[in-house]
Image (cartoon, grey):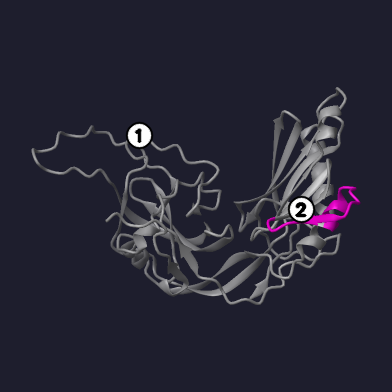
Amino acid sequence: MTRTRVAVAGILALAVLVGIGAIGWGLGRASAPEPPIVVAAGPAPSAAATIDTLPNALSSPTSTPSLSPSTARLPVLLTAAPGLTNTPTTASGFRVTRAGIDPIALASQLALAFGITDDPRSSSSQVVVGDNPDVTVNLTPLLTWEFADTRAAASAPPGKLPTRQQAIDVSSTLLGKLGVDIASLDWQVDRVDQGVRVTGWQLVVGQRSSLSWTVTIGRSGSVVSATGFAAGLQEVPGYTVVGAAFAVQRSGIAPWTALPPVAVVAAPAPATSPTAAPDGRLQVPTQQVVVTDAVLGLAQYAQPDGSLLILPSYRLNGADGSAWSILAITGTDVSFGPDPTPSAP
């Protein structure tokens, strides 16, 4: 496995080649075997936002496309058009790992970065340093962390909000000290009650992932809160990729129906209205899509334990103008877990 980046902050993230951060953490020194996907039973995932965002599968994305009432939430039946590419290949994926990171040392070093010198207090679920302001490191697979200074937020004097560029500059300086690869981020700036919130979205192969860091800056110009994570991204090379036509065909066969296609572009509403059903005939509304083109890319797969895999997936273009994402790897790297709820007697 090849280490592709080292990070020390955000709700989730990735990039390409980053060294040890300014605080000196070398994260993600993992040598574990490549993990399979764990597919848990549950409702079908919502559709991803745009083609510029990595699709989310097995999780709820931050937003969904504008689906028409006639196509929203309908089961999707994919059919490969004649001549659709069907050539197997290999490709890399990624996983986020916390291997080799000491959470107590992480909490202490984060606290120092925010000017907190108290001793860490640990429990079975988190490590805390300080008491308003304070830093909390959550013992999750991503080692998410939070900084909060409620007194600074409450006592900030009246004044102008920082400009977009000023807010980005403050956030860049802070996250850079925490070892984040600033050049790999796509910035979003929003006004919130406490001031201005800056989100740095991690870009992967030119697309925005669901991985991000946030910094909230008050009217005083000080950082009143921030969120992050300390897990690193690790490349998993050599996934065997099936042909696109094969992937389309298997999507309608159990157990692959547990990984339904994820919409990335909604189809236009049909021009005709539904007709009345003949007596006694069961009507099952579906969205039937003929796939005319496929491009190999990546999609995000949140795991039941809170970790994340980014895996080779096809972007499928339909004859109706819709576009979909579907897993491209073989069943060798997929583990279909049992239904966690008991069946009715």
Q: Nearer the viewer, mark 1 or mark 2?
A: 1
Residue 157, x across and y down, in percent: 88, 25
Rendered image quadrant of residue 155: top right
Residue lying at the far top in this picture: please name it: 158
Q: Tell me the kind of residue under disc 1.
A: Pro
Residue 335, x across and y down, in percent: 44, 69
Decide if residue 15 is on the left or right side of residue 344.
Answer: right
Residue 280, x across and y down, in percent: 9, 41
The residue under the point 81% across, 32% down is 153
Where residue 182 is drawn, which disc sits there?
2
**Disc 1 or 2, which lies upstream in sequence?**
1
Which region shows up in magenta? 108-125
Q: Is mark 2 on a helix, strand or loop?
A: helix
Q: Name the residue under label 1.
A: 69
Is 147 above or below relative to 204? Answer: above
> Magenta span has 179?
no
User: In this view of the protein, which residue sits in the foreground, 301 or 299?
Assistant: 301
The residue under the point 31% across, 63% down is 254
Circle 1 packing at 10 Å, graded few (<14), some (14-19), many (20+), is: few
Where residue 109 is drawn, which disc sits there?
none
Rendered image quadrant of residue 121: bottom right
Is 279 above or below relative to 15? Answer: above
Residue lying at the far front in this picture: please name it: 345
From this viewpoint, is residue 178 visible? Answer: no
